[in-house]
Image (cartoon, helix red, strand yellow):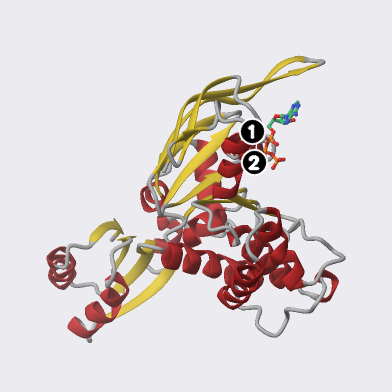
Amino acid sequence: MIQIEKLKKVFKTTQGSLHAVDGVNLKVDEGTIFGIIGYSGAGKSTLIRLLNGLERPTSGDIFVAGRNMRKVQGDELRKARQEISMIFQHFNLLWSRTVRENILFPLEVAKVRTDEKEKRVSELIKLVGLDGREDAYPSQLSGGQKQRVGIARALANNPKVLLCDEATSALDPKTTDSILELLTDINEKLGLTIILITHEMHVIHKICDQVAVMEEGKFVEQGNVIEVFQQPKKDITKHFVKQVMDPGGTSSTPEELAALHPKGAIVRIDYVGKDGEGQLLPLLIRAYPEVDISIVQGNIAKAEEGTYGHLLLHIAEDNEDTRNDMYSFLSEKHVQFEVMQS
Ligand SMILES: Nc1ncnc2c1ncn2[C@@H]1O[C@H](COP(=O)(O)OP(=O)(O)OP(=O)(O)O)[C@@H](O)[C@H]1O
């Protein structure tokens, strides 16, 4: 659906040339939710503007739904922009228009027939869960509801790609989650390809299939969300992963844990995103009812593809044979684990 090749955008500034996007390559298949994460100034917004043709590349190519965005002009560019829709951090609503009128707006611009327009607006209001709020003005809506209007408006002309520019950054965590759920729902129902830029790893792990980490105009790491979370390579990626896995920075080392739990062993179990791994601990406890097993530390997160992260278990069993037996049990269940201290 999207292919980017050796993309560069250089701005001329008073301090010289600024490489906002510096040799980015990217391939996004239809129906994927792709996240781009980076700190402020990394080049994310510039990349998004290049994707929807608001900015022209200095060099390189961008293909969206078969169109070369570097070459399209006039009517073709207008058509391309209808197929690549966008939602924003601050919603960009028309404040003097009601919810219904906001959603009507892109349909009016696209000169859709009146009866079709009304039908489409009603469908969209239902899709984003705004039934009953049709006649409210943006100032009467909560942040989450405003973003729902933004999403409905963006979907009005059946786009193929939805670009989300920090779409949840102005929302509280609970509202963020409800908007992310709506985006997942839309992705599944409509098969829409979603590109999302953010500085919050929580957003990536919650809904994205794939992620690219952007720094100084470059993609410094990219891959499946699960893989990147399991084995972040670059320091910047490790920082982002820590936002989700250890937000308070409170983890203890295995040695500290062993000092607190001198009996038995400390075992690290890795969850790698397979369904059913959540059942592992009850199985272990049921198989060894006489052994005290407790979680002494854990960084577990739920992603689209399953559960991932790790748990440190204290197995309060002095008998080495029993412990070895338990390790065999884990191996038989194809669990990745490591005995940290015993
Ligand atoms: N039109 C422009 N002219 C000159 N420099 C620009 C222009 N647009 C962006 N830049 C610069 O390009 C770099 C990347 O900016 P960009 O807005 O793409 O980053 P970002 O990752 O989206 O950060 P933020 O979230 O703060 O917007 C920054 O150094 C920015 O100052």
Please tell me the numbered disc located at residue 74: 1
The residue carrying pointer 1 sits among few (fewer than 14), some (14 to 19) or many (20 or more) residues within 10 Å by Cα, namely few
x 65%, y 34%: residue: 46
In percent of width and height, residue 250 lies at: 56, 60
Location of residue 70 by image quarter? top right
Which residue sits at x=22%, y=63%? 335
- Where is residue 179 drawn, in percent x and y? 60, 68
**Left or right: 93 with respect to 169?**
right
Task: Tell me the amino acid under the disc marked 2.
Answer: Tyr
Q: Describe the element under mark 2 as helix, strand or loop.
A: loop
Q: Which amino acid type corresponds to the residue marked 1 in the rendered image?
A: Gly
Q: Which residue is mark 2?
A: 39
Q: Ligand 1: give its quadrant.
A: top right
Question: Which of label 2 and label 1 is nearer to you?
Answer: 1
Residue 145 visible within the image:
yes
* Above or below: residue 233 compared with residue 88: above
Question: Going by the image, does 46 lie left or right of 186?
Answer: right
Badge 2: residue crowd in 10 Å (few <14, some 14–19, many ≥20):
some
Q: 298 or 216: which is nearer to us?
A: 216
Q: Residue at x 63, y 51 (%)?
A: 86
Image location of residue 178, percent across then percent down: 59, 72
